[in-house]
Image (cartoon, rainbow, N blue to C red):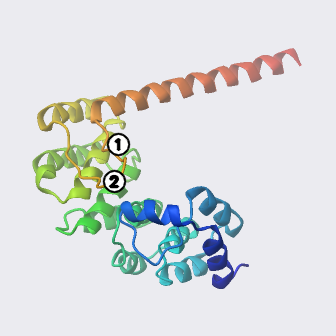
């Protein structure tokens, strides 16, 4: 089992000045080493799931360590108390989405999303809405009527919400549209009324995706993947028949 000191040494060795500049433009603050996501994945793989180490990495205050900690944290063991404690430290969208992605896999996904979505503060609301993006297609988390209510709420509020919250709401509309045809029609109607969502991404190349084209691309990709799986299954069945 790796110690905090060993992992921090790995992170420091993998960091670069160029990555620190890039991450700073995306809102990450010092201290940080500037570890690429490829290297974070390489370091995370042998660690597996390690609740204690994840807590230590988060408590270090280092940006890269916190991202890694969220990768190896045990979602099933997350408590609301720890989730709220970690949220208080979130000060950029990288950590907001990483935390939201982890909590979306936890038993408290729905409860925490409900608790945070309407916050007037940017990062709690961002995490709350990102949890919806990650769970919108899960029938055990959201009913169709609940998602329809969220679509209506987004239409009425998105223009007035903080910068990054607008981006996450945009993502929620896309995720909801992928749930079923009826919701997709509702989302596309809302999209036509509210128009492009304006989000300031600062000195980065990031963009908030246009809703309708993104939905079309995703559905096309899913159809192609389904066809490929069907072809592979048919090929395997044919081989078995010959054998």
Q: Callout 1: few (<14), some (14-19), or many (20+) C-alpha neighbours within 10 Å?
A: many
20 on left or right of 204: right
Tag 1 residue: 175
Q: Residue at x 39, y 46 (%)?
A: 139
Tell me if residue 24 can be seen. Answer: yes
User: Is residue 229 placed above or below 187 in the rendered structure?
Assistant: above
Residue 60, position as x, y percentages in the image:
51, 83
Q: Is mark 1 on a helix, strand or loop?
A: helix
Q: Earlier in the sequence, mark 2 or mark 1?
A: 2
Quadrant of image for the C terminus: top right
180 on left or right of 77: left
Q: Which residue is drawn at 29% across and 55% down?
A: 202
Checking the image for residue 132, the label placed there is: 2
Q: What element carries label 2?
A: helix
Residue 225's quadrant in the figure? top right
Tell me if residue 109 can be seen. Answer: no
28 on left or right of 64: left
The reply to whether the C-beta atoms of the residues labelled 2 and 1 are less than 8 Å apart is yes
User: Is residue 114 placed above or below 146 in the rendered structure?
Assistant: below
Checking the image for residue 195, the label placed there is: none
- Name the residue nearer the viewer: 60 or 75: 60
Residue 44, position as x, y percentages in the image:
64, 65
Residue 49, position as x, y percentages in the image:
63, 69
- Name the residue nearer the viewer: 164 or 200: 200
* CA separation in Å, label 2 and label 1: 8 Å
- Name the residue nearer the viewer: 70 or 139: 70
Residue 174, position as x, y percentages in the image:
32, 40
- Residue sitting farthest toward the right: 243
Q: Callout 2: few (<14), some (14-19), or many (20+) C-alpha neighbours within 10 Å?
A: many
Quadrant of image for the N terminus: bottom right
């Amino acid at each position: 089992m790796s110690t905090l000191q060993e992992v921090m040494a790995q992170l420091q060795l993998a960091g670069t000045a160029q990555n620190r500049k890039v991450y700073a433009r995306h809102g990450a603050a010092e201290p940080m080493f500037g570890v690429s996501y490829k290297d974070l994945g390489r370091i995370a793989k042998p660690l597996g799931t390690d609740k204690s180490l994840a807590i230590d990495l988060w408590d270090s205050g280092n940006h890269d360590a916190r991202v890694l900690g969220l990768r190896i944290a045990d979602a099933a063991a997350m408590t609301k108390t720890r989730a709220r404690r970690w949220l208080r430290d979130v000060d950029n969208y990288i950590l907001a989405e990483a935390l939201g992605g982890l909590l979306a896999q936890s038993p408290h996904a729905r409860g925490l999303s409900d608790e945070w979505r309407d916050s007037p503060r940017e990062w709690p609301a961002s995490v709350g809405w990102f949890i919806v993006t990650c769970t919108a297609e899960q029938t055990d988390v959201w009913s169709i009527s609940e998602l329809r209510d969220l679509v209506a709420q987004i239409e009425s509020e998105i223009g007035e919400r903080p910068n990054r919250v607008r981006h996450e709401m945009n993502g929620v509309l896309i995720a909801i549209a992928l749930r079923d045809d009826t919701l997709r029609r509702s989302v596309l109607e809302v999209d036509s009324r509210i128009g492009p969502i304006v989000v300031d991404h600062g000195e980065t190349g990031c963009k908030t995706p246009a809703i309708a084209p993104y939905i079309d691309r995703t559905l096309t990709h899913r159809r192609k993947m389904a066809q490929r799986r069907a072809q592979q299954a048919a090929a395997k069945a044919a081989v078995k028949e010959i054998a």
